[in-house]
Amino acid sequence: MGESECSEEKLVKRCQKGDEGAFRILVEKYKDLLLGTAYLMLKDRQSADEVVQETVIKMWENLPSLRNSSSLKPWLMRILVNEATRQFRKQSIPTIPLESVSEIADDDYNIDDLLVQEENHQLLREALSLLSPEQREVIVLRYFSDLTVPEIAAAISIPEGTVKSLLSRALDKLYMMVTCAENPTGGK
């Protein structure tokens, strides 16, 4: 067990005893991961912020019942996924407006590079939005949140084999979408 895992377990145990300082440290450690995952799932910053806030509240309320303090990340991601699913059902998902490149551009950046980067991000967002919610969820948890297959299975309460199947199908679908977008004429 690594030093950071051990110290995280100690922080969880302190939180379980009501230590708010330890809780703030854990929230700080996971806030970017939570926000990024929620944003990728919901495609809306305000909704993602709300989901993260609810997740943090539920984390504080339910940490005393966490039996295995070494499984904090998958447990936390399960809470986030449940909150994101609840939020997704509550609202219709708006399309993501692209900010104008001039707002992002800085004198130090090449505008052509920014345009290509934004085009690639838009292509990825569009491809992710075409996946089923289940496929998008496992892709986000695996490749953005960096959860392992067993951790994803624990986080969303499905068998590991189902996670592997969803990942495989989602990656195949993403590959097809991206290659078709890069070569719309089919190589002719």
Image (cartoon, rainbow, N blue to C red):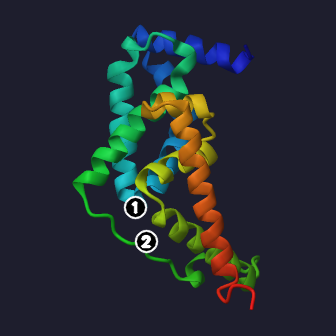
Quarter of the image containing the C terminus?
bottom right
Residue with the mark numbered 2: 96
In the image, residue 112 sits, relative to residue 23, either above or below, namely below
The image quadrant of residue 123 is: bottom right
Say which amino acid is labelled 1: Asp
Which residue is farthest left? 90
Residue name at image x 49 percent, y 53 percent: 136
Residues at circles 1 and 2 in contact by the CB criterion of under 8 Å: yes
What residue does disc 1 label?
44
Residue 19's quadrant in the figure?
A: top left
**Residue visible at 47% across and 66% down?**
130
Q: Quadrant of residue 109?
A: bottom right
| Secondary element at image label 2 | loop
Q: Position of residue 106 (x, y in %)?
A: 68, 77
Query: Residue 140's spot in the image, x, y percent?
Result: 54, 49
Residue at figure coordinates x 39%, y 50% from the top left: 49
Q: How far is the residue under mark 1 from the one under mark 2?
A: 7 Å
For image coordinates 53% across by 14% down, the residue present is: 69
Helix, strand or loop at label 1? It is: loop
Horizontal side of residue 7 vs 24, given as left or right: right
Q: Which callout, 1 or 2, points at the residue further toward the start of the chain?
A: 1
Residue 47: x %, y % from top left: 34, 55
Q: Position of residue 78 (x, y in %)?
A: 43, 33
